Amino acid sequence: MADDFCFFTKDSFIIKPPKKSPMMLRMVVLIFAMVCGVYICSVGLKQIGVHSSGRLSSIHVVEKPCEATDIEPSEKPYVHFPKPNTFSRAECACNRVRYFAILSTQRSGSGWFETLLNSHMNISSNGEIFSVKVRKSNVSTILETLDKLYNLDFLTSASKNECTAAVGLKWMLNQGLMQHQEQIVEYFKTRGVSAIFLFRRNLLRRMVSMLANSYDQNAKLLNGTHKSHTHSPKEAAILASYKPTINTTLLIPNLKQVDDMAVKAVGYFNSTRHVILYYEDIIKNQTILNDVQDFLKVPRKDLHSRQVKIHKGPLSSQVENWVDVEKTLKGTPYESFLHADYKI
């Protein structure tokens, strides 16, 4: 009996687990697969997002460069497409711009000539920007100022901004131009700047204008205001009422100095694209202004100026010591200056 009680078969120690439903196992597997799938998708989306943002940040809109395909190869160095920093040229971005500089001497008609050019809707000549001392203090500041001007970022009342087809300035020979002529000539050649020389044939008339203008800087004949140029016949008559006395001892050396400076300037810039004009020629034949517009490659327009000439008529009526001046110049290369060379 006891033996029967203590006897156990091998199978009596094996406890069989209860049977699980196949449906339950499938559900577990399905849930596990779904969790893994969601995790994998979320990681993948993050990876794609990182790559996409990286690609987007490195994509730049590439603008098609402006080209001048319908001009002679020799003209291409003078055609530019500036990209100003201060404004957008918008739909005019691919409008061609040419660079120029009016090179002259004081009281040679350059102010009048510049107003004529600025009456053209597509020409911007920005005045004597190098009359400001700091801009001509050294060649570096000169070239930096020119870069700003020709990039259309030098804004003045003459600026036509996006519509500009020719941009330039009025530059007197004694405003750093002759002192740094080598670097400036090289700049003109590499940047495609065209030079417009404007001189006065009758240097004696120029001297009278210089002396009268210098006198008015102190006298201020027009109601206490100094004006280098006038816009009414009345103002012109008031300024012309002053008759300067010319130092005859220095007369010939002064005339020669101005003449030599003009000759040197043309010689320095002879290798650049340039044209030489004379004030008297333009007064007598204003069709020359068409030639200037052709030189700048802008459409021909009727140019006009509000300026009124100050000194008119024969020089003998404009100089206090005319007899002495006449004696000094007779028999010299400058004798022709004594005679009227044009009529107004």
Image (spheres, rainbow, N blue to C red):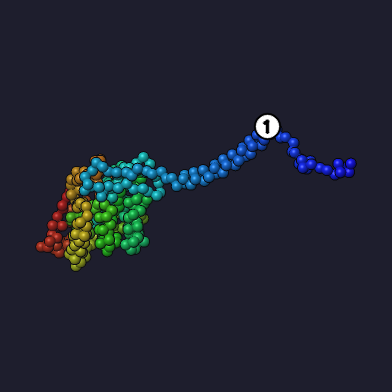
Q: Secondary structure at mark 1?
A: helix
From the top left corner, tell me how far across and down residue 94 is, in percent: 32, 42
Q: Which residue is drawn at the image coordinates 20% and 66% (left, top)?
A: 250
Q: Which residue is drawn at the image coordinates 28% and 57% (left, top)?
A: 187
From the top left corner, tell me how far across and down residue 268 is, in percent: 21, 60
Q: Which residue is drawn at the image coordinates 74% and 38% (left, top)?
A: 17
Q: Quadrant of the N terminus?
A: top right
**In which quarter of the view is residue 207 placed?**
bottom left
Tally the marks: 1
Q: Which residue is drawn at the image coordinates 40% and 49% (left, top)?
A: 86
Out of 82 and 268, give the one closest to the viewer: 82
Is residue 40 shown to the viewer in this render?
yes
**In which quarter of the view is residue 26 placed?**
top right
- Residue type, numbered disc 1: Met
Q: Which residue is mark 1?
A: 23
From the top left corner, tell me how far across and down residue 297 is, in percent: 24, 44
Identity of the residue furthest to the left in this view:
331
